[in-house]
């Protein structure tokens, strides 16, 4: 019985999604449309149609990488709400390398752009990491505020120094064709970035489960005092976890430019950094389940557009259904249980705040 209850708690986010879809069916019915037909169109368009699958994969890439950028710091009891800003800065760095380092062979140029995007996101994440470790400033507030700084910084760059001449909208010049990411589905925008995201999720899973790095990170998150006693640096783990998380989010922005948009736009992200939080908790903070939750959220987005065109449902209803899913998942996070992953993350967060000040300056 106890195992059955634990299973119900573990899959509470799945039940929340189902409940949101049931409530959403009521909204569809109020418009005079058939909810079964509407949802059949949505899921068929997202997961069974060739072009819909391609659209789902394109959206999966940034959602998955943003979700992983949230999951990693939570292992150390930290909340990274700044994936959105890290996405923007990563895209900015990648675009700059793509545009201003000409004459480099295509594969090497792609690699340099990818590294630049990861570095950009990591450097942006380093700011809240240092403020947390050495001044114990709440990383939630810092990362959230830095999102707006990054958004306006990119907006300034693409409407000024990097703006294409004569452009009717703030965006940069198009990056060279040799820097475009290879496609995995012919004649579509689906690119190999989703494969990179899948590989990183697998690597993160095995690191968490089988390596000393995962063990030490988990030790710092579960019991900072024991970690200090064992000679582990809590500050070093916080900084490294934020750097890697920022690099993951930076890759999300990089792949949006190299694989999908081919130039840097003002406000190009569709809230991927914030949706990454939903992906992380929908996956119960598990890297492999994050792949499934990212695919689901991406399918909901791409399928909703198809449902809107095919069934004739108003845009506001489609957006309301998407909002209901996010709302119900957020409400499910309030379901506390002593063995739940979220409850453990919250306990680690409080313990980390209490113990961080006890570590000597390094």
Image (cartoon, rainbow, N blue to C red):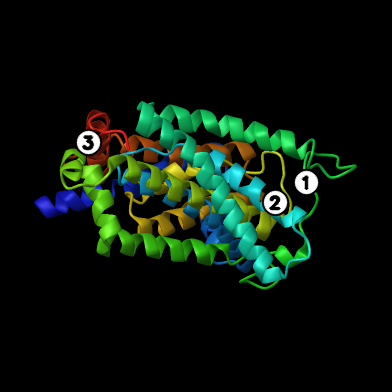
Q: In the image as oriented, which residue stretches furthest toward the front? A: 362
Above or below: residue 71 compared with residue 103: above
Circle 2: element type: helix
Point 47% across, 45% down: residue: 276
Q: Residues within 10 Å of mark 2 (few under 14, many from 20)?
A: many
Q: Which residue is mark 2?
A: 95
Task: Tell me which corner region of the image, top left, top right, bottom left or bottom right, holds residue 212.
Answer: bottom left
Can the viewer see residue 45 in this picture? no
List x then y, in percent, for residue 215: 24, 55
Of the residues under marks 1 and 2, which one precedes in the sequence? 2
Query: What's the CA distance linking mark 1 and mark 2?
Result: 8 Å
Point 13% across, 54% down: residue: 3
Circle 3: element type: helix
Viewed as shown, does residue 109 lie left or right of 118? Answer: right
Point 48% across, 54% down: residue: 64
Viewed as shown, does residue 294 lie left or right of 133? Answer: right
Q: Which residue is mark 3?
A: 347
Quadrant (top left, top right, bottom left, bottom right) of the C terminus: top left
The dot on residue 172 is: 1
């Amino acid at each position: 019985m106890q195992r059955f209850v634990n299973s119900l708690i573990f899959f509470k986010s799945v039940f929340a999604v189902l409940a949101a879809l049931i409530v959403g069916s009521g909204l569809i019915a109020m418009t005079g449309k058939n909810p079964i037909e509407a949802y059949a169109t949505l899921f068929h368009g997202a997961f069974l149609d060739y072009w819909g699958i391609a659209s789902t994969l394109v959206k999966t890439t940034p959602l998955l990488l943003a979700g992983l950028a949230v999951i990693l710091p939570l292992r150390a009891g930290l909340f990274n709400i700044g994936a959105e800003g890290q996405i923007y800065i990563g895209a900015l760095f990648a675009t700059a390398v793509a545009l201003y380092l000409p004459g480099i062979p295509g594969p090497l140029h792609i690699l340099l752009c990818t590294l630049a995007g990861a570095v950009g996101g990591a450097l942006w994440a380093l700011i809240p990491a240092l403020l947390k470790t050495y001044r114990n400033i709440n990383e939630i507030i810092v990362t959230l505020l830095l999102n707006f700084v990054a958004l306006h910084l990119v907006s300034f760059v693409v409407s000024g120094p990097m703006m294409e001449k004569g452009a009717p909208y703030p965006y940069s010049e198009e990056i060279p064709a040799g820097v475009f990411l290879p496609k995995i589905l012919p004649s579509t925008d689906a690119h190999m970035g989703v494969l990179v995201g899948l590989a990183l999720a697998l690597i993160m899973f095995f690191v968490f489960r089988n390596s000393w790095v995962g063990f030490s990170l988990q030790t710092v998150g579960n019991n900072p005092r024991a970690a200090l006693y064992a000679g582990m640096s809590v500050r070093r783990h916080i900084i490294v976890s934020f750097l890697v998380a920022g690099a993951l989010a930076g890759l999300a922005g990089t792949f949006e430019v190299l694989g999908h948009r081919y130039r840097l736009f003002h406000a190009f992200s569709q809230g991927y950094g914030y949706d990454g939080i939903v992906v992380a908790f929908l996956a119960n903070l598990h890297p492999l389940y994050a792949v499934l939750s990212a695919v689901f959220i991406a399918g909901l987005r791409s399928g909703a557009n198809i449902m809107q065109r095919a069934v004739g449902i108003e845009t506001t209803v489609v957006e309301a259904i998407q909002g209901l899913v996010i709302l119900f998942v957020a409400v499910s996070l309030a379901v506390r249980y002593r063995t739940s992953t979220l409850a453990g993350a919250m306990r680690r967060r409080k313990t980390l705040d209490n113990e961080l000040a006890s570590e000597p300056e390094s």
